[in-house]
Image: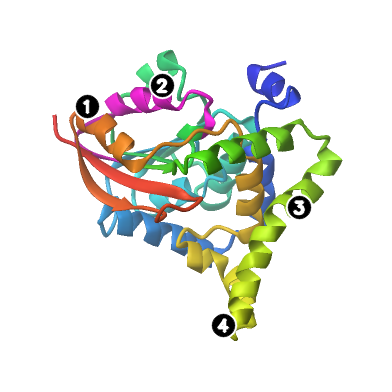
Amino acid sequence: MSDYQKEVAQGQRFEFGANWARFLSVLNEERIGMAEASLKQMLEVEDLEGKRFLDIGSGSGLFSLAARRLGAHVHSFDYDPQSVACTTELKRRYFPDDGRWVVEEGSVLDTDYLSHLGQFDVVYSWGVLHHTGAMWKALENVAPMVQSGGQLFIAIYNDQGGWSHRWHLLKRIYNRLPRIARTPYALAVMGPRSLKHLMIATLKGKPGMFVTNVRCYSECSMRGMSYWHDLVDWIGGYPFEFAKPEKIFKFFRVRGYHLENLRTCAGGLACNEFVFSKID
């Protein structure tokens, strides 16, 4: 049994890949286009032609695919074998036998593995490093992988103080439950929050607005994702760490990075997104 399998069996790790495998059934051209637009907007580029793009924790493979379609030479890796399978499936669908897209199983905590990859023009890791169980080590390992003048695009869960610690407990419980109990648990935890949003919309005289937002989630999220799969990812996503944006900023500033772009979640439950450029 691999380390990954042991961690899942012991309730210490969420099976992100299993969730992503279900997401692939709803993946379409519109969602892929949204992912491409998200990369272009945050990186402030029109394409990635000729760039070397590293996708750390590729998950569904959606953003590796988006980067490849924008012209990048892509290297994707993930610790979760099912996520590797998802990314491999997207490569098979859209870029079969393409030597400019490599998909591997690997860990951002494995410095021996990382040392063989070299440096990249763009290193991308959205919502991944806080799920490693050693976020600050993961961030430390990522820092040398961007070449001088290159870009680092990461997203890290926002530190909400006490709320973040409560979410940590809720996620831990989810992963220790029998599989049959997990969906009811997720609905019980997230249901009140969704009901609150529905009530607010109703009080504003626009109850249909809530339904519309759920239906158009891929557009509203600006990343081509789906409401249900993101909800399962949120409640199940464990290990779970978080940081205030200023801590991430200071961490990379002393390592020779300049903040180019930032999108915060305005103190909410989601991730803060950072694009840094390496100036040393």
Residue 61, percent across and down?
Answer: 53, 45
Q: Which residue is the site of mark 1?
A: 255
Residue 104, percent across and down?
Answer: 52, 29
Q: Up-down: is 10 above or below 126?
A: above
Answer yes or no: is residue 20 visible. no
Three-letter code, disc 3: Ala
Three-letter code, disc 1: Arg
Q: Up-down: is 114 above or below 239?
A: above
Number of the label disc, if any, that sits on residue 188: 3
Is tag 3's residue or tag 4's residue first in the polypeptide sequence? 3
Q: Residues within 10 Å of mark 4 (few under 14, many from 20)?
A: few
| Residue in the picture at 31% in, 24% down | 118
Answer yes or no: is residue 27 visible. yes
Q: Residues within 10 Å of mark 3 (few under 14, many from 20)?
A: few
Number of the label disc, if any, that sits on residue 137: 2
| Residue in the picture at 43% in, 53% down | 66
Q: Secondary structure at mark 2?
A: helix
Q: Secondary structure at mark 1?
A: loop
Is tag 3's residue or tag 1's residue first in the polypeptide sequence? 3
Q: Which residue is the site of mark 4?
A: 204
Q: Quadrant of residue 51?
A: top left
Q: Up-down: is 159 above or below 106?
A: below
Given this view, does label 3 or label 4 mark the residue nearer the observer? 4
Q: CA distance from mark 3 to mark 1?
A: 43 Å
Residue 12 is left or right of residue 36, and the answer is right
Is tag 3's residue or tag 2's residue first in the polypeptide sequence? 2
